[in-house]
Image: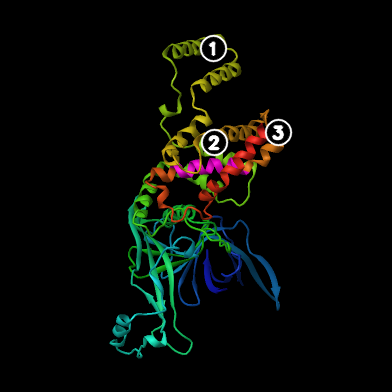
Amino acid sequence: MTEIIKANFKIENNNNISGVLATGSDSKKFSCWSSEFFHIEDHSNIYGKTNENKYISLLNCLGGSGASSYMSQNERSYSCEVYSHTLVVGKDKVNSETDKFDSISLVVGNPLKLFKHLNSFGYINFPDENLVESLNTQKYTPKFDTEKHPVIAYFNGDFSIFEQETELGTIKAHNLVTSGSLGGATGVKIENKVVITIDFREGVTIDEAFKRANLVALFLRFIGVKGLFFKDITLKKIEHEHHEFTIYHDSYEWGKEIKDSYYSEPLIDVTNDRFPEILKGWFEKSDRESVRYNFYNTYFRDSYSSDRLITAANMFDIFPVSEQDTKLSIATDAEELLTNLKMHIKSEFSTFPDIKQSLLQSIGFLTRKSLKDRVQERLNIIKPHLVGHKINTKDLEFIVNIAIKSRNYYVHGSKYKKLSPEKLLKFQGLFIDTFEYIYALSEIVECGWEFTDAPLWTSQNQIIGFEQRFDFYNKKLREAIE
């Protein structure tokens, strides 16, 4: 639904700037005009008031050029398209550097993709005598008779779905129910929105609030199914208990709606009692933030490519470990020989710095864990969980070995003799899915997840779907090599 926002702004000394934005379109630009010249500074904040007397804050605007002029009825006017990274409407102006907020909320755009097993709502088509008798004792209700087969819609009052204290704050999901107070000839309905809220321990800036909310949204999109998205973001300021600030747009990705008809299940039943602890465990590992962004960057893509293969493989190279854990264990005698060799190179090649550096770097590769070693470390985490399961770890190791050779071809140009570049391209999807499967499963297992936490292990979740396709593509790859 398109909403038109009209507002008046002040830019520098010009108090007479009008603007309009159609929020239902893809545009995030305010069309502004004035009878006086105005100029937008890069990364500036612009403030104004809407026609409904609410403050509007355009944060981190793009400028760089002044408004263009035009003549209308012998009067000169100026116009400009103003793009802001964040648009906030509320009871006050928002200063992105000094204002602090104590909570942020997101509405789940398509909650059936994540809360498929939420059973707080439903219908009773054949109520028994006891229920009918109880209904008949209620005031202001008509007489119920089981022989007439009444239909009863219900919400059981469970507003809270889950709540868990985490490193980001208290993350909770709750039902936001709306219903009419009276019935009528058109029937009745109970409507619901599922809202995800993060309550912060102390006030945080708007940028930090967005970052934490986006981390939660990314995690839920990962464990959910393709097409899960979030909308209608609101913030609450510390000093204003009841005043919400509405976000009309921002610079983060919250997922996109995908209309599909296939049956799908999340990786974890979020209505299960075990989910809050898994949620807590995920955000305890804050040092993995960078590698997780890398994972989301590949996992949420719609198409396979060499670029995605490189991204998927790089997850393991940048996975945070101590400096000691990046080195391979070698025999003491060999370590002494290498130390002496380094000293010899530094002495003999001191006048050839490029050669010296190249030789020392080559020695470093001998003691540094390779990409294959790093992938194997993550694979070792899930090995016990794969016992008796659909995927054999030996088959996974076989595919990983070739997937790394494929990645090396795109990075270094080194060809794999047993498979031509054309055939490597054919199996690119298998290689990418294998890297993502090992990474994702090892991460979630470390948070306490078990296979039994997946509500239905035959659904279309990406991780689960990989298991269903694995045997077929594993055989095809072996045939191509042989």
Residue 395, which numbered label? 2
* Residue at (70% x, 79% y) in the render: 73
Tell me the CA gap for discs 3 and 1: 39 Å
Question: Are the residues flagged by discs 2 and 3 in contact, CB closer than 8 Å?
Answer: no
* Residue at (43% x, 11% y) in the render: 333
State which tag comes first along the sequence, 3 or 1: 1
Question: Are the residues flagged by discs 2 and 1 in contact, CB closer than 8 Å?
Answer: no
Which secondary structure lies at badge 3? loop
> Relative to 195, is 458 on the left or the right?
right
| Foreground disc of the pair 2, 3 | 2
Determine crowd level at label 2: few under 14, some 14-19, many 20+ residues with C-alpha closer than 10 A.
Answer: some
Identity, as a three-letter code, of the amino acid under mark 3:
Ser
Residue 297 visible, this angle:
no
* Residue at (55% x, 38% y) in the render: 313
Residue 345, which numbered label? 1
* Residue at (53% x, 23% y) in the render: 365
Tell how many labels. Answer: 3
Q: Position of residue 64 (x, y in %)?
A: 61, 56
Q: Position of residue 86 (x, y in %)?
A: 51, 60
State which tag comes first along the sequence, 2 or 3: 2
Which residue is disc 3 drawn over? Answer: 420
What span is colored magenta in the figure?
429-442
| Foreground disc of the pair 2, 1 | 2
State which tag comes first along the sequence, 2 or 1: 1
Identity, as a three-letter code, of the amino acid under mark 2:
Asp
* Quarter assignment of residue 81: bottom right
Identity, as a three-letter code, of the amino acid under mark 1:
Ile
